[in-house]
Amino acid sequence: MSTPTRRLRATVLVLGGAALAALASPATADEPAAARQTPPLWEAGVFFGAATQPAYPGAADATSRALPLPYLIYRGPVLRVDEGSAALRALRTPRFELSVGVGGSLGSSSKDVEARAGMPDLGTLVEAGPRLVWNLADPGPRGRAPWRLEVPLRAVLDLNDSLRYRGLVFAPELVHERALPGAWRAGARFGPVFGDERLADLFYGVDPVYATPTRPAYDARAGLIAWRAGASLSRSFGPDLSLFLFLRVDSLAGAANRDSPLVERDAGVTGGIGLAWSFARSSRPASD
């Protein structure tokens, strides 16, 4: 598969996820009654967006993309395609939800990352596994609580290497979402990201064959990869058009592999903006 094709697929995963998160953000009790109507079972549309992010947590070089792409949202009682991932819901109560889902993240070529020059590329990574959601408050009109704890445990697979297993990631997050005046919605999330030794070695390990005078060999270890804090802001302009902005900061304070020669910065910023246009939707409402 060519490098442009790999990058395009990675961009679809990242920017598409941002669009879906914006469209699927739950309403809260203080939102106007018109905005609390049950969303449709499915929606289809086009997302126009741009995003930039570090090549990996701790990298000095960033990867930026901008392009339009189609999206599909499906809010079934078992199958859910929203919030940037696809999932099969196994259990749902007013307080807890258990699902098995998939997600993805942007890859990068080592030619574009000075610290990894001559090393293997970081491919498009697909994450798959269970996620537990604990609603810390009463669910809102769309079935999601304004305060909740999300606890995913996922296997990481390399899409560019025949879905080769790359390790495990555990990333619990405290999430808060609420409505703001003027049809705006805001969200915030915070939590640590942990990886096993195999995943840590993917990002931070340096095999002796790739060692240089300025990049010594390094054996990565399992543990904290980064702390993440993110914020999002979205606004609907009628039923068909939505604006979305997001910002995320990764901090390597206390990270297990802070001493790796591939870590060049203690913090990194990811950000993006997008406009989503929904051109088709179901007349049947979602079940929740």
Image: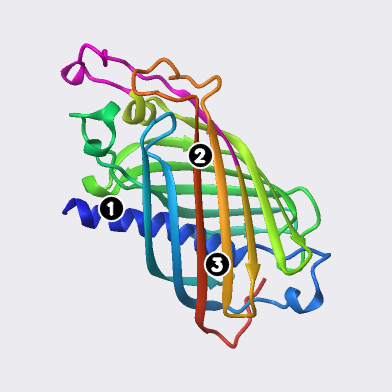
Residue 143 visible in the displayed image: no
Q: Residue at 39% of width from left, 56% of height from top?
A: 13
Q: Nearer the viewer, mark 2 or mark 1?
A: 2
Mark 3 vs 1, N-terminal side: 1
Q: Quadrant of the N terminus?
A: bottom left
Query: Which residue bears the numbered disc 1?
Result: 7
Residue 25 visible in the displayed image: yes
Could you say which disc has been placed on residue 78 in the image?
A: 3
Disc 3, SS: loop
The amino acid on which the numbered mark 3 sits, given as a three-letter code, is Val
Q: Nearer the viewer, mark 2 or mark 3?
A: 2
Mark 2 vs 3, N-terminal side: 3
Residue 106 or residue 60, whichever sits in front? 60
**Is label 3 in contact with label 1 (beta carbons under 8 Å)?**
no
- Residue 49: where, in percent of width, then height? 45, 62
Q: Quadrant of the C terminus?
A: bottom right
Numbered range of the magenta stretch: 205-229
The amino acid on which the numbered mark 1 sits, given as a three-letter code, is Arg
